[in-house]
Image (tube, rainbow, N blue to C red):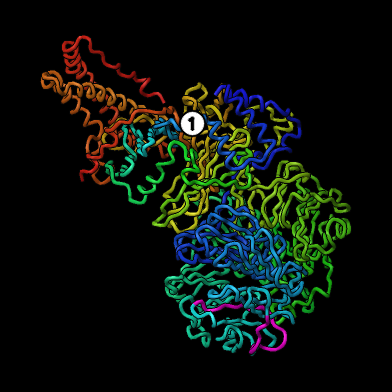
Amino acid sequence: MKKLFLLLGIFSLSGAFTQDFLNSLSAQELFGSIEARHIGPALMSGRVSDIEGHPTDKNTIYIGTAGGGVWKSTDGGVMFSSIFDKYCQSIGTVKVDPNDPDRVVWVGTGETWTRNSTSIGDGIYKSEDGGSNWKKMGLEKSERISNIIINPKNSDELFVGVLGALWGDSEERGIYHTVDGGQTWKKIFYVNEKTGCSDLIVDPNDFNTMYASFWEFRRTAWSFSSGGNNSALYKTTDGGKTWNKIHTGFPEGKLGRIGVALAPSDSKIVYAVVESEKEENKGLYRSEDGGANWKHLNNDFDLTVRPFYFSRIVVDPKDPNVIVKAGLSGAISKDGGKTFKGLGFMHSDIHDIWFDIVDSDRMLVATDGGLYRSLNKCVTMERVENLPLSQYYHISMDNEEPYNIYGGLQDNGSWIGPSSSSAGIEARDWLSVGMGDGFRVFPHPTNSNIVYSEMQGAENVWRYNQETRQLKIVKPYPEDVDQKLRFNWNAALSTSIHFPDRLYLGSQFLHVSDDMGETWRIISPDLTTNDVAKLNQENSGGLSKDNSGAENHCTIFTVAESPLDKNVIWVGTDDGNIQVTKDGGKTWENVTAGFGGKLAPKNTWVYHIEADKFNKGTAWAVLDGHTRNDGKTYLIKTTDFGKTWELKVDSSVVGFARSFEQDNFNENLLFLGTELGLYVSINGGKSWLKFENNMPSVAIHYMEMHPKKHDLVMGTHGRGVIILDDISPIRQLLALDAKTDGINKELTFIPTPKYFMSDKSDFGNTSTETQFVGANPSEDARIIYFLKKRHTFGKMSMEIRDMNDQLVTTLGPEKKKGLNIVNWNYSMIAPKVAKGKTFDFGGFISPRVMAGKYKVVITKGKNEYQTEIEVAYPENSVFTAEDRKMQFETTMEIYNLSEDLAYLVHQMDYYLDLADGYLENKNYKKAVLPMVNKINALKKTLVITTGDNYVGAAEPQLREKISDLMSSVAGYFGRPGKNQLENLAGLKEAYSKADKDFKVILMKEVAKFVDFTQKDDPKKKFEAIQSKAEFLKK
Amino acid sequence: MKTLVVLSGIFMACFAYSQTADEIVANYLENIGGAENWKKVTSQKMQASVNVQGMKLPVVMVSFANGKSYSSFTLQGKTMVQQVFDGEKGYEMNFMTQKMEEIDAESVENLKRNKDDFPLPFLDYKEKGYTVEKLEDETVEGVDCFKIKFISGKKLNEGKEIDDVTYYYFDKENFIPIVVETTISMGPMAGKTAQTVFSDYDEVDGLYFPFSIKEKLKDGEGQGQTVTMEKIEINVEEDPALFDFTEYEKK
């Protein structure tokens, strides 16, 4: 072992640290034990895009989601675990390899339900261990993968349908083929740069027969177009070599999106849902000859509604005439498509349906509000309650204790929920404060009873008083009847830092209200480009008109007041302008020229502006080019009120960005949220590190740091609210480095603030095991240190001691290379409890320490490191110092009483054990038994000597009575009750009596016994009894 | 001196070549005392303690080359058998009644299948039909590691035969495993990853053991549970009384 140490010593000497030491750290070293905390919510869940079953095991199910990755269930859809956290969270399709279904799973990223807020994929992935580990297998630029087909006889042969780019031309579309398990791909069928493969299915009886639908489609930020002359349905019967259109019976003219499915039980029967020019021939078509001829059956609403969102049809594996169509509510036909009825009640917007392979009455349905189960063919539905897939557009916070998080979600309204609750954050903790699609929600800055929320396109802006339950619509109206206000789908609503009753709302103008929305005035000219070519939303949609407000454009998208000057307001627009006023809106300066066309293409969406917290003329802007088919990351900074701008990201950051936050204390500590996760810079944007500790690669639409708690709170679009609790250790580390020229030591403690011990108690939560419960933040004290090297060899231990060096407790130290955090819950070591037949449950209680300073001692090999931490009682507590002193002293009296009794019983057991050695002795009865009887008679009044730990429990004895009092007194941090004190006095008396009685036994029966043993064998030596100090040693 | 020489050789090697899975395992076995020495181990006894916020729980774990194993814990001065397995049959303590109850058939079958894993699953892993595969390198505990997927046969999972898969993270500097991961395959946590973190390696009769073993969930809140070894002995005598189940079999 010595040699190993020597060797390690040699290696750790290399490389003296410089000021740049921190800049050289990896993400794992810098962030160490800081882990993201997921609080959901899951009660409204989020969009599920695809469901995939296992071909032979009905209980194994995978779901792909719009923004929350891939989840797996192995119990038939009761519990789900996230299995794709590291990778792109937008999922097009999941496919299980029929040749090796327990192991091999493929994921095609990029959701194919192409709504305005959909994200972008980054290729195809494969797992060979049922989803535990993944490897990217190419098709990086495919953006949206619609289907994967695997040869049921050869795992290396796959066909992949690629829908491709939504926001621009792309040649990476069509059908791809691999024969080497994804090492190389060949594009075997391609239509053009505007038309992608929207559905690809295979005949289960003949791998050479496939059907593929192609869709001509395009989105811009201001329009959507579905359909064209290139949309078509194709079939191959030679394994993809040749593809022929199969349109006999289809409508003439342009077609849109087509969904296709065949009946697994009779694969000649094929269904297609077709988007076409005329209302009368849209909808469901059926073929009974493998697609050679089609017959139009149905154009009911749910068969034709929003084809870009709902083009999926699924056939019961056992019955060719039972089919389900995705849709606003979804519909099921049991007569081969002639008639349909609605699915059971659930969240609207159905995207996929799964039938159990054994019992096809058992089904799963994917919706905008999560996943539903049905046991009766979708007559009644039950929601899966442990999928925290919520898709936030924005979040804000208040200053309550604990603080609350406000935000709006895609198709799921607006909500308020706490950052901490009694025993985790449950569904019941969330309050609905808005309808429709939810976006920006704010508490009134000085009265969080009042909440502002909005729905899409500011169709409604609400002011809600939670206390009085008064709800008022407070949106601004046009100033005259001819004026048309343009609000973004996600309209720029915000409160003010400087004026508590103020609201801002952006249309093309900036609206201001100084009386909580009662009266509005416009304080700017049109700040957008007002490009008429981008204002034709009424005609948007292509073959199916789709004017939902989602394409509103040339609008204000972000408004940022300077925290340093109430007259400085920055505005960013979705068409690429940044404008600033320095006089509270009297005059505006368009500062776009400093970056537009230079650092980013002109008209790139200004997604977020953050006025700098330290310098008045400084601002940061996040630009998002993805709706112009530009996936680059843009974070720009100005220090001169927008005259000049500089790019502050490099190629190490992946994914287009939407959100940004600057630390409240260290101006160089920056957080950037991209479509693929969280990035952190500790040097003002010179370099970035990806934060991955329990943080999925999820799109972060908005983030904000809590001013008091120093928590970074993120509104993700697919994984709900994720919090980095108290990021101050990173700040401290940076401050330490700057001060001390690096932390060139084996172990460096990071200073910590005073920790407050909570006095709160409760009875836990009400959730069942199938419901998601968000984690609470830790209330423990944190011991934080930086290790230059990971501790792997030799001992490392950690103790908390009082200031007199008496041991309070021991903790398990963390040993990572980098930043380590160890939690201490303020408890001391539990008292030693007397040994009995059964366990004494009250005896497991570890009392809490008193407020004050404590030493932390880490022993690492031969070195000892010490620091101090301070723990305190909460401010504004209901308890006085005197209450607390009395509580602690009483607790310790009971503690000591428990240990006194433990030692007393230990002595008794010692003599009983000795006596056992004389069981065979002929004088046992005379010389030994009297002692045994005396001791046992006393002992059974002190500890339980019979029964079990459940309903066979024996009557409590002195030990149990002491512990019972302990659990009453130690768990409440105020003054003990009068009865409790009286009870303690009684117990002490009982103990004293027992102690006296035992002393008498010692003098009489024990002394006689000892005499006898000496006479019996003068050479006999017993192992000495442990001293009390030795026995109680912790 | 041998350890030093071997280790420094490896350090150089690891900068010069990329390692195959087989080489990584071979280096690991060499660095923790050598495969030949490990093969001489007939039993190991570990005395350890688990720290449950403020309470130290002493535990004893003994396992034998013949597949037998035994574990006990001491709570409030009372020592109780937690689990005992004689290679064919096993018993676990019911905490309520403090009586031993027979372990369910599937778990016993899995215990039987793990017999070959004593004292190290990697010893002669090829002969045992186990496989290793090198995955992409990863950083864990701030340390650059080789990641090895290790399949040690099959296990039963709710009646279904599945691969017994473990992922090992070997520190690139010294080929010592610092983290091991498994995917939980049963119950409400199925699909989540359980992590075991090793540290405080120390020598026992020329063999190296981790004296600190922490169990936790990979992605999740909470700091996990640490088992700290106080004493490890090898080649201890078997106490036949421990494996006498007559008392337990009395219903």
Q: Which residues are magenta?
A: A244-264
Q: Is residue A210 left or right of residue A840?
A: right
Q: Secondary structure at mark 1?
A: helix
**Depth check: A24 or A536 in front?**
A24
Residue A127 or A664: which is nearer the viewer? A127
- Give the quarter of the image for residue A376: bottom left
* Chain identity of mark 1: B
Q: Residue at x 76, y 55 (%)?
A: A633
Q: Which residue is more in the foreground, A420 or B112?
A: B112
Name the kind of residue labelled 1 in the image.
Glu
Q: How many marks?
A: 1
- Above or below residue A815? Residue A909 is above
Spot occupied by residue A40 in the image (x, y as percentages of width and height): 55, 56
Name the residue located 62 percent from the left edge and 61 percent from the top edge. A67
Q: Nearer the viewer, residue A978 or A41?
A: A41
Name the residue rendered at 27%, 43% in the picture: B97
Residue A524 on the magenta span: no
Task: Specify the quadrant of the image occupied by residue A502.
Answer: bottom right
x then y, percent, for residue B164? 47, 49
Quadrant holding the C terminus of chain A: top left
In the picture of the structure, the residue carrying the numbered disc 1 is B36
Quadrant the N terminus of chain A occupies: top right
Indicate whether A666 appears above or below A66: above
Is residue A374 at all visible to an observer of this figure?
A: no
Q: Does any portion of residue B99 appear in the rendered image?
A: yes
Q: Residue at x 86, y 59 (%)?
A: A596
User: Where does residue A592 sit, x and y in percent of width and height?
Assistant: 86, 59
Location of residue A522 (image quadrant): bottom right
Residue A75 in percent (x, y) is at: 44, 60
